[in-house]
Amino acid sequence: MFKKFLLFILFIGIIAAGVYILRKNPEDQLKKIVYPSEFRVMTYNIHHGVGNDGLYSLSRIVRIIRDYAPHIVCLNGVDCKTERTYRDDQARILAAELGMEYTFARNVSLQGGWYGNVILSKYPIYFAENKIFSAAENLEPRSVLHAILSVHEKKLHVYCTHLSVDSVNSAGEMKELINHVLDWGLDEPLIIAGDLNVTPDSKTINDLTYYFNDLGSLSKVESMTYPAGEPVKRIDYILMNDKLKPLSIQTVSNDISRVASDHLPVFARFQFK
């Protein structure tokens, strides 16, 4: 009987605590307790899965991403059914291995397949478009893949891009990128991520950081991302508007990431303001 009495008291206590929480916390506040508002983002040029050792391995890419458990991943250099990567649909494989939704941007027709950018998401993707930039004839087409995600019942715009190595074309692409983002507006939270192929001291980046915050610049240590084995420059970025609060950013450098691609991934944590 005594044990039953203790269980009854415990049951009443749990109910009382629940009622207290419900009264003290409006519905939105309670959702914040149950569903943490932090979300994690990674950007990574995977070099179509071919590492510095010349080996093709998506499993290494999966392991690197899984170890950091990002909710959103912006990928550059992704193949879809090309000869060089054994006709693998890389976006589909990575999404399945990581348990994420995805959208793939077909930028370049290559070896019987395609090559482009990908957004992976743990959150629902309810809009996606690929904006191809104007490019000089015979140059590789570049683009920005834009997706709108539902994150903690809020809209989050994610822009994944990969700009040209050529500085002249890169400058033109950057202007098109900025104009495209501004056309959609700055009233809602947004992230821009990808391989921009320019260093932080370039005028091209200054054009972008006039409107958006470069998380890499907030780091106490300048974290290089390329080449992965012995990085000497930062060309991979995560940027945001003022609707988000950055919590941390780091370049992912370990024994696997220094070999798996020619770029190191960048990882950041955010909260909505």
Image (cartoon, rainbow, N blue to C red):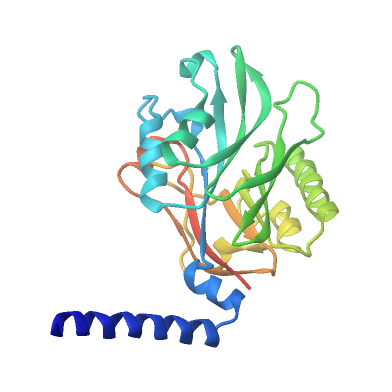
x and y percentages locating residue 257 in the rendered image: 37, 43
Residue furthest to the front: 1
x and y percentages locating residue 29 in the rendered image: 57, 78
In the image, taking residue 11 as reference, residue 35 lies left or right, namely: right
Is residue 270 shown above or below 134? below
Task: Identify which residue is drawn at 19% across, 80% down.
Answer: 4
Along the line of sight, which residue is nearer the eye, 212 or 2? 2
Task: Identify which residue is drawn at 27% across, 86% down.
Answer: 9
Task: Identify which residue is drawn at 69% across, 62% down.
Answer: 189
Is residue 251 shown above or below 98? below
Along the line of sight, which residue is nearer the eye, 233 or 161? 161
Q: Locate the C terminus and report the quarter of the image it occupies.
A: bottom right
Residue furthest to the left: 2
Q: Locate the N terminus and report the quarter of the image it occupies.
A: bottom left
In the image, taking residue 271 as reference, residue 210 lies left or right, namely: right
Along the line of sight, which residue is nearer the eye, 206 or 39? 39
Q: Give the quadrant of residue 27.
A: bottom right
Can residue 199 be seen in the rendering of this structure?
yes
Can residue 230 be seen in the rendering of this structure?
no
Task: Identify which residue is drawn at 33% across, 48% down.
Answer: 254
The mark tally for this picture is 0
x and y percentages locating residue 21 in the rendered image: 48, 83
